[in-house]
Amino acid sequence: MDFLFLAAKTLMLAVPLYIANGCALLSGGKTPIDLNAKFVDNKPLLGKGKTFRGAAGGIACGAIASAAIWFFLPVVSQGFGTNYLILGFLLSLGAIIGDIAGSFLKRRLGIERGQKAFLLDQLDFIAGGLILACLVYPAGIIEIILLVVLTPVFHLIGNRIAFKAKRKKVPW
Ligand code: CTP
Ligand code: MG
């Protein structure tokens, strides 16, 4: 396949994933999804960093961004062989679920809310999004490799910006 087309498709997978993840950060609210519940290990189920507002804002923004892409870039959208509106929604929803699963795992490993878990922090939402998206579009190996290699780089840059803008307590 034409490399440029593959790169464009990878970007179109990345946008809902990144937007959902980034907007969860921007719209983060107060009420935590786990309602402050503890797991059997007596540690927080998810922790205070996963809120209903953050999740809803992330999914909504990811879906809106996908709709915009679907509308303005119909040619690439068609390249997925499935409805990009649905794909974008699944990527956004999956990204939020993956991020939540990542926090669940961090708490089980005894890593406190906001503490760094290199690679897990950067890839949980990518994995979640790509897995849920398999319902309509199983990403190819090159798309996965591009996302996995580029994401930690972008993620670290983005988090540094969010930290400087005082949206995050730590620069990762
Ligand atoms: N956020 C939210 N709801 C979500 C995801 C994120 O409110 N579903 C907000 C929270 O304010 C969170 C911030 O975005 O603190 C950054 O997200 P993230 O780095 O995923 O959370 P952490 O605070 O680092 O917590 P964790 O250790 O569980 O990853
Ligand atoms: Mg974090």
Image (cartoon, rainbow, N blue to C red):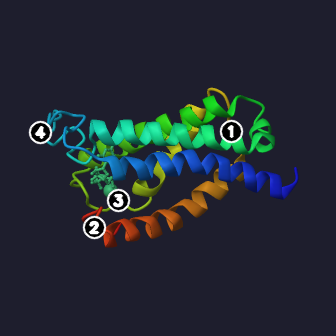
Q: CA distance from mark 4 to mark 1?
A: 45 Å
Of residue 32 and residue 132, the one placed in the foreground of this image is: 32
Q: Earlier in the sequence, mark 2 or mark 1?
A: 1
* Number of numbered callouts drawn: 4
Q: Which residue has dot 2 on it?
A: 166
- For badge 3, the amino acid type reads Ala
Whichever of labels 4 and 1 marks the residue nearer the N terminus, that label is 4
Q: Residue at x 81, y 42 (%)?
A: 75
Q: Amino acid at mark 1?
A: Trp
**Circle 1 residue:** 70
Residue kind at label 4, given as amino acid type: Asn
Q: Amino acid at mark 2?
A: Lys
How far separated are the C-alphas under marks 3 and 4? 20 Å
- Of helix, strand and loop, which one carries label 4? loop
On whether ligand 1 comes within 8 Å of the CB at mark 3, the answer is: yes
Q: Is residue 6 above or below residue 134?
A: below
Can you say whether 172 is above or below 7 in the image?
Answer: below
* Rendering coords of residue 100 (x, y %): 35, 41
Q: Which residue is mark 3?
A: 117
Q: Nearer the viewer, mark 4 or mark 1?
A: 1
Residue at 69% over, 39% down: 71
Return the disc, 1 or 3, that comes first in the chain's sequence.
1
Of all residues shown, which one is farthest toward the left? 42
Residue located beneath label 4 in the image: 42
